[in-house]
Structure formats: structure tokens, C-alpha cells
Amino acid sequence: MPAITAALVKELRDKTSAGMMDCKNALSATDGDMEKAIDWLREKGIAKSVKKAGRIAAEGLSKVVVDGNKACLVEINSETDFVAKNEQFLALLDDVANTILASNAKDNDEALALTCNGKALNDLFIEATATIGEKIVLRRFEIVSKADDEIFGTYMHMGGKSSTICTMKGGDDQLAHYIAMQIASMNPSYVSSADMPQDVVEHEREVQTNIVKADEKFIGKPEQVINGAIEGKVSKALKDMCLVDQEYFLDTAKKVSAVLKEANATCKGFIRYVVGEGIEKRQENFAEEVAKQMQ
């Protein structure tokens, strides 16, 4: 069993908003397994919801650029938010995004080997790091292509703290932009339930089954009632993971599916970046502070 460190407790707390001791107990009960600890908290009713974004830590910006039937989404990280507003950083972000857009790069190594104004992108990052005084890195990118009869919808929130691109067939540019905003704000994981892996559904069913069976009001109830409650909870939990099942942010009386249907449109797919998502931020002396509180 791994040691239940203050840093591990902090990570679970960030993901679930549960109390510190509840997080410690959950990790102890699950031998330090983060995913099982999250389920443990949910089943106990302590974690009402799990923050989908995970640990958002690194600073920087993301950017969407489009050229005809091709688009590119890029994220560049810095150590501080202050540096992300630096003119040299912003110029680097533009150069990198447009250079990658014009290429067929498949990964970061291929992207960093590309040239911009006679220099390799890798050299531009080295120069920026040396000049600005912070580590500047290309974290990730994705190139997206569409057909002539499809539309890109894009949205950049807070200058690129998060960026979204979706591909739609039907509708118009304004609707595509609104759907990108919907994705940015509501953070779906899939377009529809048809895109959802079966293991995701089964995992949620297992969690909800444990929740229902631990609920006193269902003790002694017929199996049909219990199964109905489980399926109802599974359906509700999975609904917000799917774009088309979400309430439309501009008119909550409608589902996104209805809005798309009215426009004879479909969303073919999307990508959403949140800067620093999943990267652990440097927390100086935080572990020591939490450890003291846990004693």
C-alpha cells in the first residue's frame, strides 16, 4: 500500500471538494488508489460531483487558428500567469500556432522541428525561455480537418485560458460559435451517448448501484424498484457528459439536441483545452502545511 501523503490527499481534495480527513480516509480505505477513492467518496455521499478538469496548475495560454478546411488548437505553458501576458510570449504563441497549422506534424517532436522565420520552433522556445527567464514549453496541439460542407465553431475564453473547436454539419457560423461556447462552459466528454465507451457506462452503473444499495430508503424494496432507481441515477449522471443531452446555455428550456435539430445541424466532434489541465502546480510548503493539519 502506498503512503498516504499530504500531496495525495490534496490531489483528491482538489478533484472532489471533499474534506481533508474524508479524503485521507478514502485513500486509506482504497489502498491509495485515486480513482477508487473518488468512487468511495461518491458512494458515501461525501463527493457530490467530481471536478472534471482535474488539477489545473500550469500557466500559459491556448489558441485556435483556422485556415479554410484546416484548424489547429495549441497550448503553450509558462511558469506564471504574468509571463503569459508578455508580448514575446503572445508572439511565440501566434508563430507556433500558425506554423503547426501549415504543417502535417503528428507530435511535439515533429512540431518543434518545424521552421518559422528561418529558425526551428524548438530554438524559438529556447530563446523565449532565456529572454523571459521562465521555462516556456509546447505542451500539446491538435490539427483538425473538415469537409467543404462542414463548419468550424471556435471559442477562446479569457484570451485563451481555455479554447474550443467543434466541427458541425449544417447550421451556420453563429450556431457553430455558440456550440463551441457551450462546450467550453459545460465541458461535455462526448457528443452523444453513442460515442461513450461501454466501460464508462458500466463504471457509472457500479457506482450508482453501490449508492442505491447503501440508501436506507431502498432497503426491502422490490428488485424492480431498486433497478429502476439505479438506471435513473445512471441516466442522470451520464447526461451531462454528452453534449446533445445538456441544457442549451442560451435557452435552458431546450436541450442542445433540439437546438441542433431546429437548425438541421449535427456536431461531428470537438476538442477542448483548458490551460494547465492535469498538470500539478508547484505548491511550495503546501504539503508541510497540510501534514500539520492532519496530525
Image (cartoon, rainbow, N blue to C red):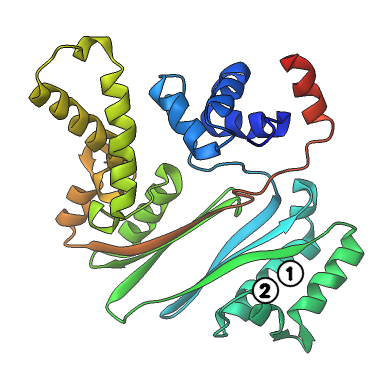
Give the farthest residue toward the front.
1
Q: Is residue 50 visible?
A: no
Residue 239 or 94: which is nearer the viewer? Answer: 239
Q: Residue at x 53, y 25 (%)?
A: 29
Considering the image in quadrants, where does the N terminus appear?
top right
Considering the image in quadrants, where does the C terminus appear?
top right
Q: Is residue 152 visible?
A: yes
Which numbered marker is on residue 92? Answer: 1
Q: Position of residue 249 (x, y in %)?
A: 33, 40
Q: Is residue 143 above or below residue 232?
A: below
Q: Position of residue 136 (x, y in %)?
A: 78, 62
At label 2, the amino acid type is Val
Gap in angstroms between the C-alphas marked 1 and 2: 6 Å
At label 1, the amino acid type is Leu
Q: Residues within 10 Å of mark 1 (few under 14, many from 20)?
A: some
Q: Residue at x 57, y 85 (%)?
A: 103
Q: Residues within 10 Å of mark 2 (few under 14, many from 20)?
A: many
Which numbered marker is on residue 191? Answer: none
Which numbered marker is on residue 96? Answer: 2
Q: Position of residue 68 (x, y in %)?
A: 43, 80
Give the farthest residue toward the bottom.
118
Q: Quadrant of residue 98?
A: bottom right
Q: Position of residue 12 (x, y in %)?
A: 58, 32
User: Dots 1 and 2: beta carbons under 8 Å?
Assistant: yes
